[in-house]
Image (tube, rainbow, N blue to C red):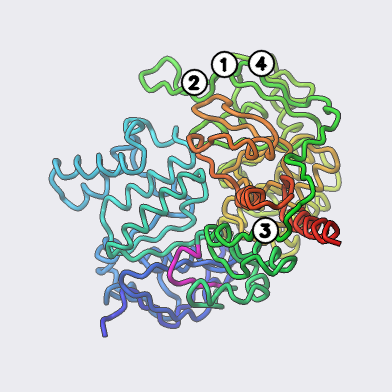
C-alpha cells in the first residue's frame, strides 16, 4: 500500500501569548490524506482549521506529535523547501502572501526562485493570469485590486508553481457567486488530474463537493467521512456549530410538510429535480409577487451622479464608479451586489467619508459629504465594517479595540458599552476582553471588528461582506442581530457576495456592474422577473430557484424571502387543494 501524501500523528499545538498564557489550538490530531484526495475541512470559528493546515506546509511546527508530507517530516528544517514545493496554500487573508508591487511580478515571484528560464516564466504567468481573469490587471499594483481579485492573485501565485497538494483556506469568501463556481470548477479539474485538494470552508454547499469531509471541534477531529455520512446526523452537525447543506436543510423542512419532496439531497440540482408536481388538479389562484408596498420612509442616504477614479490623471487610472445613484430610507436594509471589482466597497467608503466625491453628491443623514468640513461627524453617524477586519484595528487587546471609538466619543459607562457590543456579536465579555487580537481566528476577528463598530451605536451601519469568514451558527446569529437593529430603526447598507444569508433582512438590491448600478429593486421582483444577472457575478439564490420550480410544477405559492415563509406557503397550498376537493 502506498504511503499517504500527508500523515499526521498525535499533533498538539498551542499559541503562546506575550504574558505567558497558553491557548491550546490542536489536541491530538491523527489523520492521513491520500495523494489525489479531495478533502473539505470544516468547523466553527476557532476550531483549529487554519492552524491545522499551516502545519501541512511547515508554517507551524508541532508542540507534540509529527506531520509527514510525502515522507518528509516537517520537524526537519532542511526539508521545508521541498515540503513547500509540494504543498501550496492560499491563506485566509490572501494579502498576507502578496510580495510584489505589480500583479504579474507577484505571480512570477515563486517561479523566479525555482530558477526557471525567462521564457517559461512569461508563458506560465500569462496562462495563469488569463485563466483567473487577471490579465487586464497585470500591470496594476495589488493594493488597488478588490478583495476578490486579491484572492485570485494569491491563488495564481500558488497554482503557477504546480504543487502536488493545494490548500484553500477560505479562499472563496471574497469572490462573487459566479467567481466561486469558476474557481471550484478549476481546482476540481486539477484534482481530477491528480492534484490533492484540501478546502477549508464555512459553506456547506462547497463542502459537499468534496469526497471526504473532516469536521474539527475545539482542536479535535469530531467527524470524518463522506459528505453523506457526515451530514446524515443534522442534530450532531448543529451541535458542532455548523449546519447541513442548504439543499438538504430546505428539503427536510419541505419533506416534513409533504412527503413527496426529496428528503436527503446534498446538492441543489438534486432538490430541484425532485420537486413534485402539485398533487391537486385545480389549485387556487396564487399571487405571483408579494409586492405589498409600504409608505416610503424618509431618505437617510442619497447619492447622485457619483463618480470615482483611482489614480486619476495617471497611466494606471481605473474608473471604479460612474454616474451612481442610490437612495436608502430610514430603517431600510439594502444589499449592494455585483461581480468582484464592480465598485461595491468603493461606494460604501463614500458613505462614511473614507472617500470623498470627485464628482456628484452624497448625503448621509444631515451630512453632505461633497461639502463636509469634519468627516468625523459622519463616521460617528455611519459606522463601517471593512472587508478585511484587521485593517481597522488600532489596539492589541480585544477589549481595548472595542472601546477605542466610544472612548474618543466620551462614553461614560465604557465597560458596559464594550460588554454589550461583544455580546451582540456572540463573544463572551470575560472570555475575550483580554484576548490578543493576533490569536483570534478569521471569523473571531470579523466579530470583534463588527463589535467595534456597534459600540459607537451609529444610526447607519455600512457592512462590507459581514458574513465572510463566519461559521454557519455565527451567520445566523448575525442575521438575528441585524434584524433587531433594523427593527429599532437602524439603516443598513450591506455589500455582499452571499445574498442567500441575508434574504430575510433585505428590502432592496442594487446590482453594480463595472461601476454603475445595472439593476435595482426588491429581491422578489429582480429574481421573479428572471433578469439576467450572470454578467454581474450573481447566481439566483436557492430559495428563489425552488419557488420558481414549484410554480412551474403547478404549486400556487408566492415569492417569499425565507425558508419558513416557503414552508408555510406549501402547507397553505396543500390545505387549499384539499378544501377544494371536499
Reply above or below: 119 against 346: below
Is residue 577 among the parts visible in the rendering?
A: yes
Q: Can you identify the residue that label 4 sits on?
A: 361
Whichever of callouts 2 and 3 sits on the residue coming sooner in the sequence is 2
**Please, what secondary structure does the residue beneath circle 3 have?**
helix
Whichever of callouts 2 and 4 sits on the residue coming sooner in the sequence is 2
Q: Are marks 2 and 1 in contact (CB under 8 Å)?
A: yes
Q: Residues within 10 Å of mark 4 (few under 14, many from 20)?
A: some
Q: Is residue 216 left or right of residue 259?
A: left
**Please, what secondary structure does the residue beneath circle 2 have?**
strand
Q: Position of residue 4 (x, y in %)?
A: 31, 78
Q: Residues within 10 Å of mark 3 (few under 14, many from 20)?
A: many
Q: Can you identify the residue that label 3 sits on?
A: 474
Viewer-proximal residue among 444 and 546 = 546
Q: Position of residue 68 (x, y in %)?
A: 33, 76
Q: Quadrant of residue 150?
A: top left
Q: CA distance from mark 2 to mark 4?
A: 15 Å
**Please, what secondary structure does the residue beneath circle 1 have?**
loop
Q: Are marks 3 and 4 in contact (CB under 8 Å)?
A: no
Q: Can you identify the residue that label 2 sits on?
A: 309
**Please, what secondary structure does the residue beneath circle 4 have?**
strand
- Magenta stretch? 207-216
Amino acid at each position: 500500500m502506498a504511503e499517504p501524501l500527508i500523515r499526521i500523528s498525535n499533533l498538539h499545538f498551542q499559541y503562546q501569548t506575550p504574558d505567558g498564557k497558553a491557548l491550546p489550538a490542536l489536541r491530538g490530531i491523527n489523520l492521513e490524506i491520500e495523494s489525489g484526495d479531495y478533502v473539505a475541512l470544516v468547523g466553527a470559528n476557532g476550531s483549529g482549521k487554519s492552524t491545522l493546515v499551516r502545519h501541512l506546509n511547515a508554517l507551524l511546527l508541532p508542540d507534540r506529535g509529527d506531520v509527514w508530507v510525502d515522507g518528509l517530516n516537517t520537524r526537519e528544517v532542511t526539508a521545508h523547501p521541498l515540503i513547500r514545493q509540494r504543498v501550496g496554500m492560499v491563506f485566509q487573508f490572501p494579502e498576507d502572501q502578496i510580495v510584489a508591487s505589480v500583479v504579474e511580478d507577484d505571480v512570477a515571484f515563486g517561479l523566479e526562485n525555482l530558477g526557471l528560464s525567462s521564457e517559461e516564466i512569461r508563458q506560465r504567468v500569462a496562462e495563469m493570469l488569463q485563466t483567473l481573469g487577471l490579465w487586464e490587471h497585470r500591470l496594476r499594483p495589488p493594493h488597488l485590486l478588490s478583495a476578490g481579485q486579491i484572492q485570485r492573485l494569491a491563488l495564481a501565485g500558488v497554482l503557477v508553481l504546480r504543487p502536488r497538494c493545494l490548500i484553500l483556506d477560505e479562499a472563496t469568501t471574497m469572490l462573487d457567486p459566479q467567481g466561486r463556481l469558476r474557481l471550484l470548477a478549476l481546482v476540481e479539474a486539477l484534482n481530477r488530474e491528480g492534484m490533492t485538494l484540501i478546502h477549508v470552508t464555512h459553506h456547506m454547499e462547497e463542502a459537499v463537493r468534496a469526497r471526504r469531509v473532516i469536521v474539527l471541534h475545539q482542536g479535535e477531529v469530531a467527524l470524518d467521512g463522506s459528505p453523506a455520512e457526515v451530514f446524515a446526523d443534522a442534530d450532531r452537525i448543529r451541535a458542532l456549530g455548523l449546519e447541513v447543506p442548504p439543499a438538504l436543510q430546505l428539503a427536510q423542512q419541505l419533506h416534513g410538510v409533504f412527503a413527496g419532496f426529496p428528503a436527503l439531497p446534498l446538492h441543489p440540482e438534486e432538490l430541484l429535480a425532485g420537486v413534485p408536481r402539485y398533487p391537486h388538479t385545480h389549485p387556487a389562484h396564487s399571487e405571483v409577487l408579494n409586492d405589498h408596498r409600504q409608505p416610503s420612509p424618509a431618505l437617510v442616504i442619497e447619492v447622485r451622479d457619483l463618480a470615482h477614479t483611482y489614480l486619476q490623471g495617471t497611466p494606471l487610472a481605473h474608473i471604479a464608479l460612474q454616474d451612481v445613484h442610490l437612495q436608502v430610507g430610514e430603517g431600510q436594509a439594502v444589499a449592494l451586489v455585483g461581480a468582484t471589482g464592480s465598485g461595491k466597497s468603493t461606494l460604501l467608503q463614500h458613505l462614511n467619508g473614507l472617500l470623498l466625491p470627485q464628482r456628484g453628491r452624497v448625503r448621509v443623514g444631515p451630512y453632505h459629504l461633497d461639502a463636509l468640513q469634519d468627516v468625523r461627524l459622519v463616521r460617528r453617524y455611519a459606522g463601517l465594517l471593512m472587508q478585511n477586519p484587521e485593517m481597522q484595528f488600532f489596539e492589541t487587546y480585544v477589549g481595548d479595540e472595542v472601546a477605542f471609538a466610544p472612548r474618543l466619543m466620551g462614553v461614560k459607562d465604557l465597560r458596559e458599552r464594550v460588554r454589550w457590543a461583544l455580546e451582540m456579536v456572540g463573544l463572551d465579555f470575560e472570555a475575550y476582553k483580554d484576548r490578543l487580537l493576533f490569536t483570534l481566528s478569521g471569523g473571531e476577528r470579523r466579530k470583534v471588528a463588527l463589535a467595534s463598530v456597534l459600540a459607537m451605536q451609529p444610526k447607519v451601519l455600512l457592512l462590507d461582506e459581514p458574513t465572510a469568514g463566519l461559521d454557519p451558527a455565527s451567520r445566523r446569529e448575525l442575521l438575528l442581530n441585524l434584524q433587531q437593529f433594523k427593527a429599532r430603526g437602524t439603516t443598513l447598507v450591506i455589500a455582499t457576495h452571499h445574498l442567500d444569508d441575508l434574504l430575510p433582512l433585505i428590502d432592496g438590491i442594487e446590482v453594480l456592474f463595472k461601476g454603475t448600478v445595472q439593476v435595482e429593486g426588491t429581491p422578489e421582483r429582480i429574481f421573479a422577473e428572471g433578469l439576467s444577472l450572470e454578467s454581474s457575478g450573481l447566481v439566483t439564490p436557492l430559495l428563489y430557484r425552488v419557488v420558481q420550480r414549484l410554480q412551474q410544477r403547478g404549486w400556487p405559492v408566492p415569492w417569499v424571502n425565507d425558508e419558513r415563509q416557503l414552508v408555510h406557503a406549501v402547507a397553505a397550498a396543500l390545505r387549499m387543494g384539499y378544501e377544494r376537493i371536499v
